[in-house]
C-alpha cells in the first residue's frame, strides 16, 4: 500500500519604489492521504517592507530567528514551534508582527512586536 503525503512552500516576492518597498508571500501547504489532522495550510510569511534612509518598517506575518548558534536555539522564543511538521522544534510558524528599525551612526535599534496565534499539536 502506498501512502502519499505532499508538501509545498512556494514564495512570491515583489519590489518597487526603487527597492524601497517590497512584498513577500510564503505559504506552506501539506496534504496527507492517511492523516487528515496533518493536512493543513499555513502562512509562513506575508510581509510588506518600507525602507527609508534611516528607518525600516515591516508589517505582516513572518518568522524571526533569534539565537546564538545553529545547534541550540535557547532564546528563539519569538515564533511558536510548528509541532505538526517538526516535533523536534526546528520548524517555526509565522507570527503577526510589526517591526520598526532605526538605523543610526552608532548602530541599529530594532523593536519587534509579535502577537500570538493558536496552533495545532
Image (tube, grey):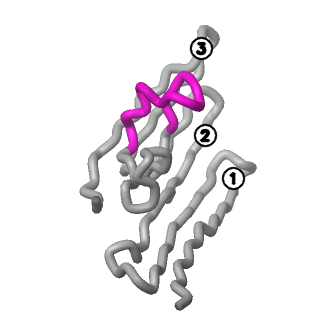
Q: State left or right for residue 85 relative to residue 105.
A: left
Provide the secondary structure element on which disc 2 rests: strand
Q: State left or right for residue 61 relative to residue 115.
A: right
Position of 30 relative to 82 (above/below): below
**Residue range (magenta):** 65-79
Residue 107 visible in this rendered orientation of the protein = yes
Position of the C terminus, as image quadrant, is: bottom left
Residue 17 is marked as: 1
The percent position of residue 65, horizontal first and vertical second, equals: 51, 36
The residue sitting at 42% across, 26% down in the picture is: 74
Which residue is nearer to you in this view: 75 or 50?
75
Main SS category, magenta section: loop
Would you say the residues marked 2 and 3 are in contact, meaning their CB atoms lie under 8 Å apart?
no
N-terminal-most mark, 1 or 2: 1
Residue projecting furthest to the right: 18
- How many residues crowd around disc 1 within 10 Å: few (fewer than 14), some, or many (20 or more)? few
The residue sitting at 34% across, 41% down in the picture is: 114
The percent position of residue 7, horizontal first and vertical second, equals: 56, 73
Amino acid at each position: 500500500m502506498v501512502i502519499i503525503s505532499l508538501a509545498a512552500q512556494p514564495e512570491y516576492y515583489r519590489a518597487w519604489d526603487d527597492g524601497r518597498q517590497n512584498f513577500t508571500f510564503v505559504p506552506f501547504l501539506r496534504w496527507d492521504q492517511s492523516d487528515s489532522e496533518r493536512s493543513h495550510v499555513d502562512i509562513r510569511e506575508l510581509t510588506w517592507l518600507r525602507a527609508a534612509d534611516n528607518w525600516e518598517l515591516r508589517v505582516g506575518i513572518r518568522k524571526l530567528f533569534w539565537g546564538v548558534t545553529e545547534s541550540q536555539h535557547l532564546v528563539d522564543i519569538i515564533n511558536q514551534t510548528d509541532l505538526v511538521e517538526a516535533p523536534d522544534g526546528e520548524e517555526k510558524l509565522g507570527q503577526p508582527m510589526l517591526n520598526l528599525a532605526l538605523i543610526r551612526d552608532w548602530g541599529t535599534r530594532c523593536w519587534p512586536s509579535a502577537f500570538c496565534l493558536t496552533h495545532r499539536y
